[in-house]
Image: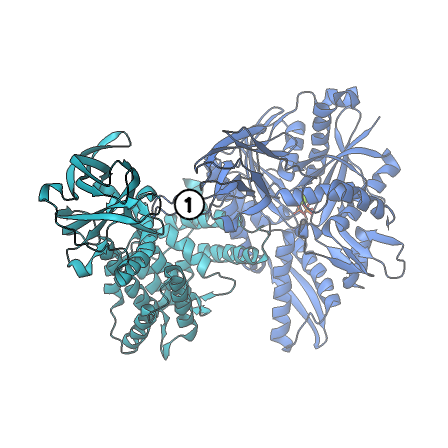
Chain colours: A cyan, B blue
Amino acid sequence: MLEVGVVVVLAVIWLVYLRLTGSGMLIPRRRSTSGPLDRERFMCKIDRSQIDFNGSRVPGFVIKMRGQLRVPHNNCDTDVQAVAFDITEGQNNAHPVLSILPQWQMEDSPAFCLVAHNGKVPRKVSILANWVTIGSIPCSVLKFPRTGQRQLKFVISLLNRSNGKELLCTATTFPYDNREAGYIDLRESFQKVEGMIIHLAVAAAMEEEGASEKGLAVIREWIEAKDKTSENQDNQNPRLAVLEKAIQKAMQDDFDAEAACRSIAENASIVDRYNAIRLVLRVVAAEGNIDREQTDQLTLVAELLRIDKDKFRALAQKSLPINTHRIEDIRFLLGINETMPSEEIRRRLNDEYQKWNGRVTHPDIEIRTQADRMLGLIAEARNRFVEQGWKVTAAS
Amino acid sequence: MSVIAGIDLGTTFSALAILNSIGKPQIVPNAEGERITPSAVFFDEEDTNVIRVGIEAINSRQLNPERSVRWIKRHMGDRKYKKSIDGKDWTPEEISSLILKKLKQDCSRDEGDINDVVISVPAHFDEVRRKATMDAGRLAGLNVIGIVNEPVAAALYYATTCEVTGRVLVYDLGGGTFDVTILDVQNKDINIVCSQGDHALGGIDFDQRILELFQQAYREKFNAELLVDDEARAKYEDEAEDLKKTLSRRPSAKKMLYGEAGSMRFEITREQFEEAIAPLITRADMLVEVTLQEAKCNPSDINKVLLVGGSTRIPTIRTRLEEKFGKAPEVAVNVDECVALGAAIHAGLTKMREDPSEIDSGIAGGLRDVKLKDVCNHSYGTICAPRDQETGQYVVQNSIILKKNTPLPCESTQRFFTMVDGQTELQVTITQGEDTDPDYVNKIATEIFELPPDRPANRPIKVTYSYDLNQRMHCTFQDEESGRVLEVNFCIGENGEMSEDNVAHKAAEMESFKVE
Ligand SMILES: Nc1ncnc2c1ncn2[C@@H]1O[C@H](COP(=O)(O)OP(=O)(O)OP(=O)(O)O)[C@@H](O)[C@H]1O
Ligand SMILES: [Mg+2]
């Protein structure tokens, strides 16, 4: 469940991140104030305490302000706004803190932003003598760039409600221990995983004389589709660079596919593991003939990526349709192997038979032909690999 | 009074039976005096006023294969299939209607006009094929009051004519299709348990194997092709069938092959034939096993194996069944005729249920005790997007609502939810098939369900499918909050390209074609 969320959020974060740090637009300027007494200064603080949220008590940030409010005229209507940054890597290298709930996001990005109506300030200079709560945010709603000890900075501004202009601004910083994976962490591991998937796909495209052009075309297509969703077109495409490197490595036979699979299995989300096997299957499918070595490797890759056996078989049957592909080892497509007892093979083949028999009347001619070929294949496999299947069950 | 009939519209042979005055079905021979009629059509070049159907068509076929049609049942419901003759594109329904017309015409000579008829179809025929069959009947000017599954018809006849009790497996291997059906019989009470079929397995596939052996032998001897044109193909298809039938009687058979490169003697033993058809027999074996599995029973739980269909005359099929079930299969009824006979009984039962005042008291008395409980032949579902349990991703899936083999009449409801905020439309798709992968199921209807505006996601939609005794399916989609309902009457004979008007119009057009 989580994984999908992460993937979606990440795509957006990439955008936000660049925009915020790139332009610096959203980091409020500090103003030199005329230096009122400390106690009168406009200031803010964040209390960490249990708050009510959706009917339960959860740990939260309680944002408060107090001090002198200077406004252009008496009875000036105001809003108060809170934004937050992670400044662990320095003020100049601030990362936004994000919110997973839309009501606490900026209009055009998921960066955290809370705006509340503060009401009319009676006089041009008024003083809030006590701490006033602006808002309470559950900790789990905010997302930080990295995991571990972080330095957070909250910036509170008083805005003129009539024109949105900032009237006053103050900030507070404090340490925070983030127990969750940071969004940059996730993106990095995501890139790493993606890089490995590309490497693996290239390895799958390798033939004796080099990489299969059709196979590489599939990978390029995959990269293009990824680029489209991530909107990262301004700088040099890093994925293509990975592809070039992967091709070089594969040419020099300097790539450990098994290790890559293990690493993907460990680091990638389950969705990405499926993406990996899908891509590899598509790469292999780009060529019409699939020999035994390839099918053995595919089986191994699926196993290492910890892909469910039945799902893998369904994927393989779909990606390598028997009516357009010549597959040397039919057992691969049928999910059987030589170590299985005859009775189990019989049962599995019956299941496959039932499945494909249901498809043999499909309105789509392609599927119909595929189903018919599969049924032929299944019958052939039964004759070859099941001894006495018919009578054995007569006895049972 | 009205004549009630049942028609077995077979791949290779068709037959017609009527109910006599005491409700017993009997075959009506055709104009040539035969009890079954080849399902073949020949468009005579010399005399374009008449279309030849039956044995005449078979005999003329070798002269001009281009103008002949056989095995049209395999194309039933295929919208792409067209046979072009003299500028007219004939659909499978139209060609089938010619066969039906001939049966109807021959029957009326002796027995008077047929009023109501039930036509049989393989159990595994889908909605589209059933509808096409029904349309063919209407094009032939028949009042099709129902459709019955062939094995059910066979079982009906069997149970009403023989003393049977227990669990019966009907093994129906005909010319073009193969069905296995398991049913429980208690006197004249018949409960269908389940059915499985292979759409592409039948006698003509065995013939093809022999034909391949002909070709292979000829190539080996002369290094030349035997089947140089359609005429040669048509001829040797018939020869192959003939040889196959001989092999059911004798341990070996011979044929002369006359090709352009020379002639040769072809000899084949029963063992060689069995070896050639082994993959097909294996398919049949598997179908038996999966049907047993579906019925959750062992071979030993089957009390009787009933043979139906001409291809069950092949000895190895009988021996194999004996091996599997530990007893010889029964040929208690005529394998070529029992489907038509059973269809006539089914027609009587349907008439009694729908229109009891219209039925002869003698017929009603004869059918009084017969009770049939049939099942839904396919699973029906809808396309939705649940979260995959393993990956957590939304995946487009076919979700089955009405499960195959549920006793009729049946109804089932499931609840789904809208996906996004402000969703005002829901595309509803009705599917037929067992797969969860939507690419592999047959989408039999798609409609747009309009929803109220300005609502958050996750609004419940109640989906109800039902299937009645007349094999009519009905679906409703209900928006629970607003009470809005979309009804989809997926009624055989009303969906698809052939609308009511269209059928009536076509039927009038078809009337102008004479068959003989
Ligand atoms: N003695 C025999 N040996 C082998 N096959 C036979 C024999 N007699 C008939 N057949 C085959 O039986 C088939 C016809 O059987 P049947 O009339 O039951 O089929 P159908 O009703 O036309 O087809 P279907 O029910 O599949 O639509 C033909 O393929 C024919 O060759
Ligand atoms: Mg038949």
> x, y percentage for residue A318?
46, 57
Q: Is residue B114 left or right of residue A257?
A: right
Residue A19, position as x, y percentages in the image = 30, 60
Residue sitting nearer the eye, A204 or A33: A33
Residue located at (30% from left, 72% from top): A246
Which residue appears at 21% of the width and 52% of the height?
Answer: A85
Circle 1 Cα neighbour tier, 10 Å, few/some/many (<14 / 14–19 / ≥20): few
User: Where, by quadrant of the figure, is residue B229 drawn?
Assistant: bottom right
The residue depicted at 39 percent of the width and 72 percent of the height is: A216
- In this picture, is B1 found above or below B335? above
For disc 1, the chain is A
Does the beta carbon at disc 1 come under 8 Å from ligand 1? Answer: no
Quarter of the displayed picture in which ligand 2 can be seen: top right
Q: Quarter holding the N terminus of chain B? A: top right
- B482 to B171, vertically: above or below: above
Q: Position of residue A299 (x, y in %)?
A: 34, 60
| Front one among A264 and A157 | A157
Q: Eyeballing the image, is B200 above or below B221?
A: above
B55 relative to B460 in the view: left or right:
right
Q: Amino acid at mark 1?
A: Val
Q: Quadrant of residue A200?
A: bottom left
Regarding residue A16, the answer to whether it shows in the image is yes
* Residue B445 x %, y %: 60, 43
Residue annotated with mark 1: A392
| SS of the residue under disc 1 | helix
Residue located at (87% from left, 34% from top) = B112
